[in-house]
Image: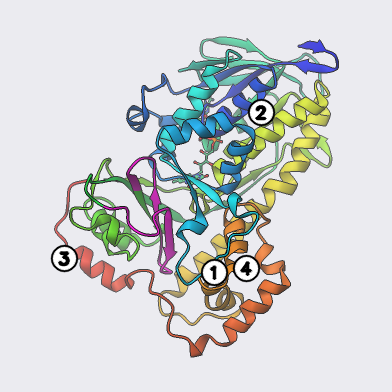
Amino acid sequence: MFFEKGWVRMRIVITGAGVSGLMASLFLARDGHDVVLLERDATPLPEDAEAAFEWDRRGATQVRHPHAFLGLLRNLLRDDLPDVMADLVAEGAQDVNWLDFAPDTLDLIPQPGDEDLGMIASRRTTFEWVLRRAALRTDRVELRDGVKVTGLLTAEGTSPPRVVGVKTESGDIAADFVVDAGGRHSGIRTLLGDIGVKFPEERHDTDMAYLSRFYRLLPDAELPDNAVFTGGTTGYLGYGIFRGDGRTFSVTIAIGTDDKELRELIVGPRFDVAAGMLPAGKPWLAQGASEPIAPMHVMASTINRKRDLVVDGQPLVLGYQAIGDALICTNPLYGRGCSLGSVQAKMLAAAIREHGDDLQAVALQMHDEAETVIVPWYNASVVQDDAAREARKSGPGQTLTGAASILAEGLLPLTRTDAYVARAFFRMVNLLSPPDTLFTDPEIMRKAMEHWALRDTRPPEVVLGPARDELIAALKAAEPVAV
Ligand SMILES: Cc1cc2nc3c(=O)[nH]c(=O)nc-3n(C[C@H](O)[C@H](O)[C@H](O)COP(=O)(O)OP(=O)(O)OC[C@H]3O[C@@H](n4cnc5c(N)ncnc54)[C@H](O)[C@@H]3O)c2cc1C
């Protein structure tokens, strides 16, 4: 550790070169720290976005699924790492504004703040490849790939334990500070357990399976309307059509893990048939519009999980901070993970800048900020999942009641006709305002209640997908297509 006029330059070891680890490397290296980034996948930097798409990333298998890089992350790149943002765009990622793709039914007069309502449309592999390239450009980041962290080194006789480095299969590495950005499968429980630290953990399974496939628009095909992201739910399934970098796009269908019949029919050969039956998917998957560029991928066992490394105001460990999915993981359906991990990376750099080697203060600040900024999104994901589970149980054609009815038949339809509500909704979806914003704004609630009261006088809402029976019948009748 070097002291320079009150500022402390540290040697920081980061476990995991996923989005959170790369963002932490960028922020910490640009603050002048020396970063050793350890990644267990033996994955040298690919040459270009297409090589990155073939990247062997077994440690982060979700890279095979679509990712939306929401406004919070996009604005953080724009404001704090503009060179990385420019690199992304140069490599084909799309910096798109939600309002440019809003339905014609919205009368949108430009307003200050609209410029924040952007997101980055890109394959996750392209996004991560650009971040890694940027991290490696700084001579303060040393990436060692193919190196797995297997344990923590601690100072003698400290309580709580003070981490002073990591053990790896290829030897010990000393550090002033260790960041665990090991993702959902970080070995944090074992790593900390081995040095006598037990921490509280809360976990909720999402009970959903994600089925995804990437495609590319053919050279002569026009970009369909509403071309950034189109998502919807039919109750028994949720889906998203995600634009990627260049002319790539992807489709994800999320279904309950207990819906065995549907899963067995869609998983595998008939995925394209199901995707093509979604109204939003039709223009993308129409004959002659696109071709698949990857097999279909499935991911189940997704979770919301929250861990606490500070209990009753006391850090359980010093010189060690988990960020990203290793600390707080949210249902991927809401597209929050990369934004929340990146914000924690920035928060960590700020805490170290502010408190230097006062490791207790660093730990407490990270905990307080996570409670204020990150945990509300975790809680919101758990609540949203409970509501989705109820909707799946009730099945199609259900009569909605209570808050679910006000949301589905009052508030959400307004996002297509009322510019004030639409902006508030897009801000919330992009994590630019707190998760309860829509329900705590009296103006929005007044409008929603008025709209809801008139629900029986309006034409029925747009149908967002086929009825389950219709889909099942079509899948059974379809010729399997190899995936
Ligand atoms: C199906 C799916 C879809 C998703 N869609 C979105 C989306 O649309 N938008 C969004 O923002 N988020 C999305 N997410 C969430 C997002 O992928 C995660 O939140 C994000 O990847 C977390 O980043 P991370 O760096 O914390 O972990 P990861 O990206 O998982 O990276 C962890 C890294 O650590 C490495 N590692 C682990 N243990 C060790 C060790 N002991 N030693 C060395 N290296 C180690 C791993 O190999 C890996 O590379 C999705 C997730 C899933 C599962």
Ligand 1 under 8 Å from disc 4 Cβ: no
> Mark 1 — residue?
415
Q: Is residue 181 visible?
A: no
Q: Amino acid at mark 2?
A: Leu
Between 414 and 308, which is closer to the camera in this rendering?
A: 414
Question: Gap in Å between the C-alphas at discs 4 and 1?
Answer: 8 Å
Could you tell whether 364 is left or right of 85 in the image?
right
* Residue 476 x/y as whole percent: 19, 64
Q: Element under label 4?
A: helix
Mark sitting earlier along the chain (1/2): 2
- Indicate the position of residue 28 as horizontal and vertical percent values: 66, 24
Looking at the image, is mark 3 or mark 2 nearer the viewer?
Answer: 3
Q: Which residue is the site of mark 4?
A: 420
Q: Position of residue 465 (x, y in %)?
A: 35, 69
Residue at disc 1, secondary structure: loop
Labels 4, 1: front one: 4
What residue range appears in magenta? 222-249
Pointer 1 with pointer 2, Cβ within 8 A = no
Earlier sequence position, callout 4 versus callout 1: 1
Residue 383 x, y percent position in the rendering: 61, 61
Q: Earlier in the sequence, mark 4 or mark 2?
A: 2
Marks 4 and 2, how far apart at CA:
47 Å
Which residue is at the front of the view, 70 or 204? 70
